Amino acid sequence: MRSFEEAQAAMWRDGLISGEMHLGIGEEGIAAGVVGNLVDGDAMALDHRSTPPLVARGADLESLFLEVLGSEKGLCRGQGGHMHLLAPELLAASDGIVGAAAPLACGFALAARHLLPGRVAVAFFGEGAANQGMLLEALNLAAVWRLPVLFVCKDNGWSITTRSRQLTGGSLVRRARAFGLRAHAVDGSRFDAVARVSARFIDRARRGGGPGFLLARCHRPHGHFLGDPMLRMLNEPLGQARQLGPALMQATLAEGGARPAARLTALGGVGGRVARLTLQYTLRRRDPLDRARALLAADTAAQIEERASAEVRAAARTALDRAALSQAGEGR
């Protein structure tokens, strides 16, 4: 998963992938821990960071690369990009609409009850989606109908560039329990902990015990999307200050008029947000790969990583060659 995301990032930086790129780097422990408990016939409803769970589930890497490159040879004929991926053979679908994974998972779970008894559905979404009406309705519906579904909330503490606690009241675990769901919080950087807790929830759902809610805390080092300007302010403070300072002053002049105190207050608000982001990204780094390596012998971990990286590199090279040939053919 990490190798695939890094390869996507390289393609995006080279201008080969258009639009925003939402990476799942930092979420691998959650995807690995949950997906490792799924079997054939289980379904996944995914959000706009959909490639890590698809890679974990065994989706064809070359087909995924071709899709994000916009090729007709891609998973969805180049029409879905990285946010709207559909893999029918894996019963997996992603949606870029915030919170949409929850009702999609309920649909998968209802179908499983009638067509594939003993199978479950999993929904992946961020904590920023927790206040969406359709997600709350999905929690209620899953509880009332006792659907075989696990809701997985990936909590990095940020709703784009706003601290989530400034937007969300109370505890998400207690909120899920209020709907009648079994709910638990876990460190999402510890894939073994995620695997252990999600296994209990999934096994319970398979036996008709009803839905579960897993809150997995994580850290995403690339921010909301690749090239996130908030992170550029951290990594290049002087250059960004020179670039953004005049515009910020103009904005604060418009907001505060000629009053120096008002301008300073507005600029202080921006500075405070950057300071909080700095703490988040320097003092609380928890890389799931570092945690996983510690559970293995060093040579074993190195061999696994090299095999995975080689597989991704080969798929990326083939996809780039096929995409280039396709474009050349269109040019002729």
Image: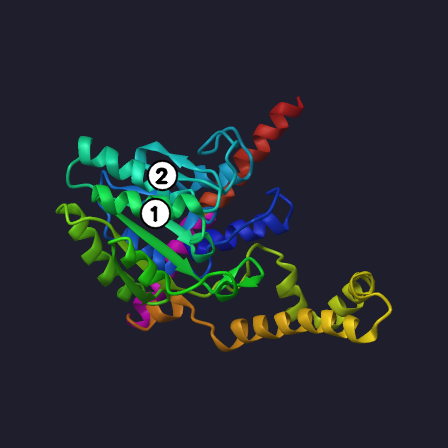
The kind of secondary structure element at disc 2 is helix
Q: Residue furthest left?
A: 207
Task: Report which residue position mark 2 lands on.
Answer: 104
Q: Are marks 2 and 1 in contact (CB under 8 Å)?
A: yes
Q: Which residues are magenta?
A: 296-313
Task: Report which residue position mark 1 lands on.
Answer: 123
Q: Residue furthest top?
A: 332
The percent coordinates of residue 33 (x first, y second) are 29, 58
Can residue 295 be seen by looking at this rendering?
yes
Q: Which secondary structure type mostly characterizes the magenta part of the structure?
A: helix
Neighbours of disc 2 within 10 Å: few (<14), some (14-19), many (20+): many
Q: Is residue 153 left or right of residue 228?
A: left
Q: Is residue 76 left or right of residue 235?
A: left
The percent coordinates of residue 303 (x first, y second) are 34, 62
Residue for point 27% across, 60% down: 183
The mark nearer the N terminus, 2 or 1, is 2
Residue for point 48% across, 66% down: 165
Which quarter of the figure is the C terminus placed in? top right
Residue for point 34% across, 44% down: 138
Residue for point 23% across, 49% down: 211
Q: Quadrant of residue 62?
A: top left
Amino acid under disc 2: Leu
The kind of secondary structure element at disc 1 is strand
Tell me: residue 167, above or below residue 92. Answer: below
Which quarter of the figure is the N terminus placed in? bottom left
Q: Is residue 9 left or right of residue 41?
A: right
The percent coordinates of residue 277 (x first, y second) are 57, 70
Amino acid under disc 1: Ala
